[in-house]
Image (tube, rainbow, N blue to C red):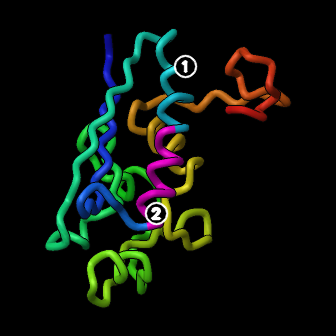
Amino acid sequence: MKKLKIEWVHLDVEGETCDRCYDTGENLNQEIKRLSRALQPQGIEVEFIETKLDATKIPQSNTIFFNGVPMEDILNIEVSKNYCDSCTSLLGAETYCRTVTYEGNEYEDIPAKAIRQAAYKALGLEEETTTGDSGCGCGCNGGCC
């Protein structure tokens, strides 16, 4: 069976993370479920690895790798940084964290659509698109997936 290895690298301070990383984690969890449902019938297993960083590695925090390749090397994503109030509170020092510019918009978390798009591109597959249905088979018309 072919594998898609997704690694998420983020700040962890005694089990807590910043708001940006938390939101990325939520997006990532949803997309991993969606990707697993879509890719398993094609013989592709999705493997998830979470790597927790300490405060000394903030510039690397909130990064997603697909089969070892950073997301920004797969998609047309620009990485920059700005002040992060959440990390500043967590760490007790002024902190600047990663942001991504995707499809012309700057995000502090990594959007679900970018995660999905990068996963398919990393596998060399076209993302299956359907009209009016998420393709998950539950009949939600994209509502739950």
Which residues are drawn in magenta?
19-29
User: Is 127 on the left or on the right of 39, as rendered?
Assistant: right
| Image side of residue 100 versus residue 140, left or right | left
Question: Toward the viewer: 99 or 17?
Answer: 17
Disc 1: which residue: 37
Q: Quadrant of residue 133?
A: top right
Which of discs 2 and 1 lies nearer the camera? The answer is 1
Residue at x-position 47% and y-position 14%: 40
Residue 139 screen position, x and y as percent: 80, 19
Lower position in the chain sequence, tag 2 or tag 1: 1
**Left or right: residue 84 compared with residue 112:** left
Q: Is residue 29 above or below residue 96?
A: above
Tell me the crowding category of disc 1: few under 14, some 14 to 19, or many 20 or more residues within 10 angstroms, Cα based: some
How many discs appear? 2
**Three-letter amino acid code at the position of disc 1:** Arg
Residue at the farthest bottom position: 94
**Residue for point 28% across, 53% down:** 9
Q: Is the C-beta separation of discs 2 and 1 under 8 Å?
A: no
User: Where is 25 relative to 135, above or below?
Assistant: below
Q: Is residue 30 left or right of residue 6?
A: right
Q: Position of residue 60 (x, y in %)?
A: 24, 65
Relative image position of residue 72 (x, y in whole percent): 38, 58
Task: Residue 7: name its quadrant.
Answer: top left
Crowding around mark 2 (Cα neighbors within 10 Å: few <14, some 14 to 19, many 20+) is some
Q: In what quadrant of the picture does the N terminus appear?
A: top left
Report the residue that reaches farthest toward the right.
132
Residue type indicated by callout 2: Ile
Image quadrant for the C terminus?
top right
Q: Is residue 71 above or below residue 1?
A: below
Kindly identify which numbered label has been placed on residue 1.
none
Q: Which residue is labeled 2 in the image?
A: 77
